[in-house]
Image (spheres, rainbow, N blue to C red):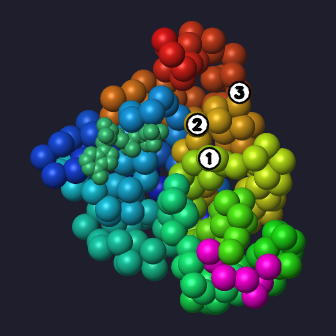
């Protein structure tokens, strides 16, 4: 299952603080969209807003043809939206297999398909969540999303804090998900080169607004945009 997602004129934040300030984007079914920008520009807030985890003051969110901005988070999940947060939030005392089992929604990936994608998780299937390395926890967080039968996968900095060799393994698995499932994937990622290799399209945020959008191929060639909105320390 793959569903498109889009938003019009999102105004959202935390309590009285507005972070997203009139943000609109479209990601058709099967799209891969990188959400880029420096620290604190609102990337995580955008994913949280799509999930219903912020204070939405205005705007519309469409999942396929359905307006979802008024739905509580769990109904958005059942409608096909799945969020893999930066902090992974796996169940520490449940085993790998149990973490997957509690997240199964019929029609999604099977546990065995997840183990095929992540062989190192298969080897740890009876280990508790809190016995896993950071990389394995991230694989489990992604696996848990897949068994939940999503139509849209929201990934928040999946590569953060991982050793280069694990980043490579995870990137290859995410590319397999992209190519074999056709899922719509929104990826927030500080590793801009990886994000541009992964996604077809990109939006770049600055202070809660989109300041650049286009294909990743175009962004790779746009040194000015990279310098203005993505490079560190300027
Ligand atoms: N729970 C919260 N309560 C209040 N303000 C918040 C909260 N979470 C984030 N913010 C503020 O919202 C703004 C955007 O933060 P957000 O985490 O969305 O940025 P980001 O682009 O994802 O950054 P990073 O790459 O550092 O994760 C920041 O000014 C941040 O301090």
Rendering coords of residue 197 (x, y %): 74, 37
Please name the residue shown 63% across and 77% down the image: 129
**Considering the image in quadrants, where does the N terminus appear?**
bottom right
Tag 1 and tag 2, C-beta contact below 8 Å: yes
Please name the residue shown 67% across and 60% down the image: 134
| Mark closer to the chain start, 1 or 2 | 1
Q: Nearer the viewer, mark 1 or mark 2?
A: 1
Image quadrant where residue 114 sits: bottom right
Residue located beneath label 1 in the image: 160
The answer to whether mark 1 is within 8 Å of ligand 1 is: no
Q: Indicate the secondary structure of the residue bearing disc 3.
A: helix
The answer to whether mark 2 is within 8 Å of ligand 1 is: yes
Rendering coords of residue 216 (x, y %): 66, 31
| Mark closer to the chain start, 3 or 2 | 2
Ligand 1 occupies quarter:
top left
Q: Nearer the viewer, mark 3 or mark 2?
A: 2
| C-alpha distance separating marks 3 and 1 | 23 Å
Residue located beneath label 3 in the image: 217
Instruction: Identify the disc placed on residue 190.
Output: 2
């Amino acid at each position: 299952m793959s569903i498109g997602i889009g938003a019009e004129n999102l105004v959202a934040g935390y309590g009285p603080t507005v972070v997203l300030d009139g943000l609109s984007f479209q990601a058709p079914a099967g799209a891969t969209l990188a959400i880029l920008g420096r620290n604190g520009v609102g990337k995580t807030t955008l994913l949280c807003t799509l999930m219903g985890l912020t204070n939405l003051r205005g705007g519309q969110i469409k999942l396929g043809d359905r307006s979802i901005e008024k739905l509580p988070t769990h109904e958005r999940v059942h409608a096909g939206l799945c969020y893999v947060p930066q902090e992974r939030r796996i169940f520490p005392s449940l085993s790998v297999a149990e973490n997957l089992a509690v997240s199964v929604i019929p029609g999604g990936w099977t546990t065995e398909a997840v183990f095929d994608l992540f062989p190192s998780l298969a080897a740890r299937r009876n280990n508790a969540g809190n016995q896993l390395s950071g990389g394995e926890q991230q694989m489990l967080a992604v696996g848990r999303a897949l068994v939940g039968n999503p139509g849209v996968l929201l990934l928040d900095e999946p590569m953060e804090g991982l050793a280069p060799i694990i980043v490579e393994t995870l990137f290859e698995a995410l590319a397999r998900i992209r190519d074999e499932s056709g899922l719509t994937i929104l990826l927030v990622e500080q590793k801009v080169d990886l994000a541009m290799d992964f996604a077809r399209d990109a939006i770049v945020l600055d202070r809660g607004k989109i300041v650049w959008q286009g294909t990743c191929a175009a962004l790779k060639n746009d040194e000015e945009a990279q310098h203005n909105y993505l490079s560190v320390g300027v």
